[in-house]
Amino acid sequence: MSDLSNLTEAIVKGNRNEATRLTKALLEAGMKPLDIVEKGLVPGMATVGEKFKRNEVFVPEMLIAARAMKEAMAMLEPLLAKAGIKPKYTAVIGTVQGDLHDIGKNLVAMMWKGANIAVVDLGSNVPAEKFINAAKESNADIVGLSALLTTTMPAMKETVAAFKKAGVTKPKLIIGGAPITQEFANEIGANGYAADAASAVDVAMKLVAA
Ligand code: B1M
């Protein structure tokens, strides 16, 4: 196996020491940082996402894989920044106002980062205006709204409506969380719904490519 496929495997297994060792070796061998990201790291997180969808791995494995990816990325980010290379897409994400649940939202943020999307994470209990301001400031392509409570679903509806009212139509609004359904997304006029963190990558990529 090449160092590149070994790096992908190290991410899938969440082996951070091996991931950083191989990233360093690939850099020393002259590979471009962006190639390491796109051909080594991103496929690793994509594989983890697919396994998660098939219930072959669970939240802890995803967290461990993301930590390995984060450590490898920490070596590459300064080099990418120096070369003026930025992720192609930017996403803003947060849990809607009134809702403090952030574990699922964090997983979505992690998977988006794993797909080489820049992520502005606003945390939890985020009012609509804060989403709108962050989307404008970062010129976001995607805005992700998470809600875990049936009582905060109306805040999600209000946030989607606030984007429309403010005329901020560039970002694709993607919603998710345990009580959320595709029907609810249709009802409130969100652009997309994802049932889990791995599908959130597919939905985001489909919407930005459209
Ligand atoms: Co809360 N809580 N909680 N809680 N909590 C639930 C959600 C609940 C179902 C428990 C229950 O009653 N069985 C219930 C909601 C009932 C309902 O509304 N139908 C509930 C309640 C009632 C409450 C309080 C009101 C309790 C109280 O105080 N009386 C309170 C509310 C506080 C508030 O938010 N204002 C409360 C508080 C808390 C804690 C703070 C203690 C803690 C949160 C800690 C934290 O997040 N930092 C907590 C927890 C941990 C839970 C449970 C146990 C676990 C949630 C979780 O993290 N799941 C939960 C019961 C349960 O689910 N078993 C429960 C793991 C996570 C990976 O899954 O978040 O679903 P999930 O994310 C998935 C998908 O939904 C999706 O992808 C993720 C990964 O695949 N997804 C997205 C999520 N966001 C997405 C966004 C996307 C796309 C996909 O696009 C942008």
Image: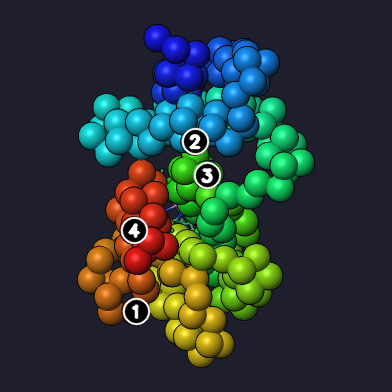
Distance from label 4 to label 2 (Cα)?
A: 18 Å
Which amino acid lies under the numbered mark 2 shown in the image of this protein? Glu
**Which percent across, then down, holds residue 151?**
41, 70
* Label 2 vs 1, first from the N-terminus: 2
Viewer-side residue, 95 vs 3: 3
Q: Is residue 134 above or below residue 19?
A: below
Q: Nearer the viewer, mark 2 or mark 1?
A: 2
Distance from label 2 to label 3 (Cα)?
A: 8 Å
Residue at the farthest bottom position: 165
Within 10 angstroms of label 1, few (less than 14), some, or many (20 or more) residues? some
Verify CB contact (< 8 Å) between mark 1 and mark 3. no
Judge left or right: residue 89 versus residue 54.
right
Q: Nearer the viewer, mark 1 or mark 4?
A: 4
Q: Which mark is residue 206?
A: 4
Q: How many marks?
A: 4
Q: Which residue is mark 3?
A: 116
Q: Which residue is mark 2?
A: 38
* Label 2 vs 3, first from the N-terminus: 2
Distance from label 1 to label 4 (Cα)?
A: 17 Å
Q: Nearer the viewer, mark 2 or mark 3?
A: 2
| Mark 4, secondary structure of its residue | helix
Which amino acid lies under the numbered mark 1 shown in the image of this protein? Gly
Q: Nearer the viewer, mark 1 or mark 3?
A: 3
Verify CB contact (< 8 Å) between mark 1 and mark 4. no
Viewer-side residue, 98 vs 163: 163
**Which percent across, then down, holds residue 60?**
44, 28
Judge left or right: residue 57 versus residue 82.
left
Q: Which mark is residue 189?
A: 1
Residue at the farthest top position: 1
Q: Residue shown at 61%/30% (left/top)? A: 32
